[in-house]
Image (cartoon, rainbow, N blue to C red):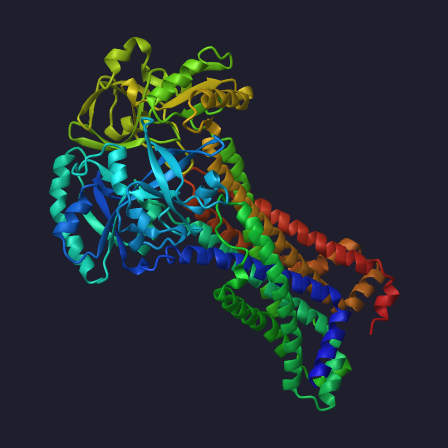
């Protein structure tokens, strides 16, 4: 019996090759998309689960008021951990964590010098007992030696290739160019990227204090993070309440920057909130939109493929009506017919699952190319969770797409079937509903593609309010290095102008509180040198710029502010007003037009001030934009010749915006791929239903043609009910596509296009045009036949 069912299935597949290929590929691509979405979702869901103690790790954060808004910060005082360890009970372990970018130098036995900027983490000795970072080489106990440093596998490869570097010596340089020699104590195994604590090398916290000359008892100095391990969750609230005793101590040390409270978060909660915390020097989780959007789109594509399967499965069953009738007349039970059709359709779903493994592997590889780090592994079949997911997906797909056709087809009366009075017209309520849903989903995808294409063009052409096209920024690490490289470029004909800064647009600024009388404002402060605004082409709307003639009088006494700060204070004439930042009183000498630092942030109040030259660490070079890459290469060669102990990290100003460009490209790739799949499946479904409709109306079409009806009138007659359905889909899909696009734009960007009527109407016109072309093609093929054949039909 099973053999007979199997042979019938094979025979049916051979007769309907197009049906099999379309649905196996359609479902295969859809399930492949679901595999990627599932792995992407699990990457986010498994954040920090590599750490054995992840459920008992907590983090101390602070909150302070900015006007009437409570803002949370990831930092904590460097003196907090030592005080807590001796004064508060219930804490199993406490660890301070700070991170810096520092040059590391290694000289090979062949005298080859390798220098790279490395992300160096400093942590207290309990760090490797609190967090789980297995070693590939070396002994974890070496971490407790101040003279040892541990490297990640990727960092080790940069310096030592595939060799075991344990025992090798490397030099770590601080901001002043002073080197400390470390012995490599170990190399970590590859660290998963869904781990909130990111670093490239690790050494003890006392090295941070000594290397950067920090007083451990100074409450004004911040640690990047303070982590706690508390085995008894009931104790956490008590510990948090005990932290209140340190609030006054902290506020007395920084009266200009008073905190409101200390609070404790679990590692899981911190990971979730990490993107919203200010001064977060630990790490952050995936953007919620990057997790939710692929999952939603994958589910919609899977439903689309299932709906297409239902329609086409019912359609081809029209050819098997006599087989069904004869089997029932000869005593066949409906149950056996259901099992047969369900088995045939389930087999197609299973074949689609096999195809999805190949599609999934391809899509994962393409997904990985979109990001700078490995999010999901191509070895996904090694995960038990993936197999469970695939099994559930197969069952879901089979039930949704295969069960209804099997029940529906087996329900007909055999006498009516054999008399030929049963025909599938493609106009059933289910078929119409599925078509509306299919085109709605396709329209949602197409609207998203159009919106994000428009947004990419808008952001590429966006005016930030300064000239970013002619600038090279060169981080030097110290003023000594800055002076060396600056002097070497003074006679370079490609250099138009140069200036120096400590903070730079799009590269980094300091958050401070500015006070005017009793008004406070949170500002972004830039410490810089003369002519900065002029070189950056930031438009001055009032007052003057910092220029060499006022250098002495402006130093730590004058400020240039932006229009946002003027609005914040409600000033009519800001020139001559005095604001206080920390202990400095600064007189406003100029106002610049608002400019944007990035597409991720809104306009903020900003303050420029000049500082002593020894605080300047970044050189800004202005050159001809047509030869900027060549000039950057010249600067790099000068750097490598004059400053051999530090890697060159200069870049074009426009390169600091590459992340935004990459995000745009990746979003477009995702939506364009899904849109192509969705439209293809929808057009196939429409073609199938039109074919069924024409099949039932074959004689009518033949008579109309014989009586002289035009092709256009027949086209409109057949297409009218379908275009009513598409009109409903346009309203439904257009509304959802609009709101979904707005929601996604708002979740990713602060600066983006306003979605307008064109963004919705254009996709609707495209979809209706494709639908009309599909209808016309089928009707043309039908009308090209001799009408006599149509009249003889049946």
Q: Quadrant of residue 513?
A: top left
Q: Position of residue 393 (x, y in %)?
A: 54, 67
Image position of 753 (left or right of 532): right
Q: Quadrant of residue 530?
A: top left
Q: Position of residue 774 (x, y in %)?
A: 71, 55
Q: Nearer the viewer, residue 554 or 447?
A: 554
Determine whether 22 is above or below 219 in the image.
Answer: below
Determine whether 85 is above or below 620 in the image.
Answer: below
Identify the residue shown where x is 71% and y is 73%.
317
Determine whether 273 is above or below 753 in the image.
Answer: below
Q: Position of residue 347 (x, y in %)?
A: 65, 72
Q: Tell me how many marks there are.
A: 0
Residue with the most extreme bottom position: 331
Residue with the most extreme top position: 549
User: Is there any visible trace of residue 114 in the rendered image?
Assistant: yes
Q: Nearer the viewer, residue 354 or 470?
A: 354
Image position of 784 (left or right of 750): right
Picture quarter with the C terminus: bottom right
Q: Nearer the viewer, residue 706 or 282?
A: 282
Q: Position of residue 282 (x, y in %)?
A: 33, 44
Image position of 159 (left or right of 139): right
């Amino acid at each position: 019996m099973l053999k007979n069912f199997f042979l019938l299935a094979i025979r049916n597949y051979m007769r309907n090759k197009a049906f099999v290929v379309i649905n196996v590929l359609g479902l295969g691509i859809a399930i492949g998309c679901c595999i990627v979405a599932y792995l992407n979702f699990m990457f986010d869901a498994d954040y920090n689960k590599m750490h054995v103690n992840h459920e008992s790790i907590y983090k101390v954060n602070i909150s302070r008021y900015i006007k009437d808004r409570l803002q949370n910060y990831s930092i904590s005082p460097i003196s907090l951990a030592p005080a807590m360890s001796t004064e508060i009970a219930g804490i199993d372990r406490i660890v301070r964590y700070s991170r810096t970018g520092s040059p590391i130098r290694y000289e090979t036995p062949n005298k080859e010098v390798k220098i790279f900027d490395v992300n160096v983490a400093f942590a207290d000795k309990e760090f490797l007992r609190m967090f789980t970072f297995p070693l590939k080489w070396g002994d974890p106990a070496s971490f407790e030696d101040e003279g040892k440093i541990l490297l990640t596998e990727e960092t080790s490869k940069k310096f030592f290739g595939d060799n075991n570097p344990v025992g090798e010596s490397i030099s770590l340089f601080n901001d002043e160019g002073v080197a400390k020699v470390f012995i490599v104590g170990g190399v970590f195994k590859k660290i998963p990227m869904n781990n909130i604590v990111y670093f490239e090398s690790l050494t003890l916290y006392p090295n941070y204090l000594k290397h950067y000359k920090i007083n451990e008892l100074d409450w004004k100095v911040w640690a990047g993070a303070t982590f706690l391990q508390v085995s008894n969750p009931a104790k956490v609230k008590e510990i948090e309440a005990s932290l209140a005793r340190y609030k006054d101590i902290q506020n007395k040390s920084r009266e200009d920057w008073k905190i409101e409270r200390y609070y404790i978060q679990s590692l899981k909660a911190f990971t979730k909130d990490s993107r919203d915390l200010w001064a977060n020097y630990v790490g952050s989780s995936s953007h919620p939109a990057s997790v939710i959007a692929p999952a939603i789109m994958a589910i919609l594509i899977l439903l689309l493929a299932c709906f297409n399967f239902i329609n086409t499965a019912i359609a081809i069953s029209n050819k098997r009506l006599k087989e069904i009738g004869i089997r029932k007349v000869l005593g066949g039970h409906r149950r056996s017919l259901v099992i047969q059709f369900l088995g045939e359709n389930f087999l197609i779903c299973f074949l689609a699952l096999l195809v999805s493994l190949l599609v999934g592997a391809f899509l994962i590889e393409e997904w990985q190319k979109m990001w700078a780090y490995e999010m999901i592994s191509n070895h996904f079949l090694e995960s038990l969770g993936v197999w469970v997911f695939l099994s559930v997906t197969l069952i879901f797909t089979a039930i949704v797409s295969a069960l209804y056709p099997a029940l529906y087809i087996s329900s007909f009366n055999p006498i009516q079937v054999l008399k030929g009075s049963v025909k599938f017209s493609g106009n059933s309520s289910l078929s119409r509903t599925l078509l509306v849903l299919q085109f709605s989903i396709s329209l949602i995808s197409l609207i998203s593609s159009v919106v994000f294409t428009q947004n990419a063009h808008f952001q590429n052409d966006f005016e930030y309010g300064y000239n970013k096209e002619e600038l090279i920024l060169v981080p030097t690490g110290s003023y000594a290095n800055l002076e060396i490289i600056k002097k070497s470029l003074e006679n370079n004909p490609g250099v138009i102008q140069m200036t120096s800064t400590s903070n730079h647009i799009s590269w980094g600024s300091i958050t401070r509180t500015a006070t005017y009388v009793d008004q406070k404002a949170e500002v972004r402060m830039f410490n810089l040198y003369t002519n900065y605004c002029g070189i950056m082409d930031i438009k001055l709307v009032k007052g003057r710029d910092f220029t060499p003639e006022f250098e002495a009088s402006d130093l730590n006494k004058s400020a240039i502010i932006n229009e946002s700060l003027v609005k914040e204070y409600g000033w009519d004439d800001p020139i001559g007003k005095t604001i206080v930042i920390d202990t400095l009183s600064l007189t406003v000498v100029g106002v610049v037009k608002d400019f944007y630092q990035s597409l991720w942030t809104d306009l903020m109040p900003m303050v420029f001030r000049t500082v002593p030259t020894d605080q300047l660490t970044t050189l800004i070079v202005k050159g001809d934009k047509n030869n900027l890459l060549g000039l950057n290469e010249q600067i790099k060669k000068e750097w490598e010749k004059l400053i051999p102990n530090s890697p060159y990290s200069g870049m074009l100003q426009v390169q600091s915006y590459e992340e935004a460009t990459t995000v745009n490209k990746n979003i477009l790739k995702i939506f364009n791929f899904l849109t192509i799949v969705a439209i293809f499946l929808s057009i196939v479904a429409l073609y199938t239903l039109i074919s069924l409709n024409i099949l039932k109306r074959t004689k009518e079409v033949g008579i109309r043609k014989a009586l002289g009806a035009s092709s256009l009138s027949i086209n409109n007659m057949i297409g009218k009910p379908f275009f009513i359905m598409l009109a409903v889909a346009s309203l439904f899909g257009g509304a959802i596509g609009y709101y979904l696009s707005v929601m996604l734009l708002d979740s990713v960007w602060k600066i983006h296009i306003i979605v307008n009527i064109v963004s919705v109407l254009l996709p609707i016109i495209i979809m209706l045009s494709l639908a009309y072309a599909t209808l016309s093609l089928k009707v043309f093929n039908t009308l090209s036949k001799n009408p006599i054949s149509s009249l003889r039909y049946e």
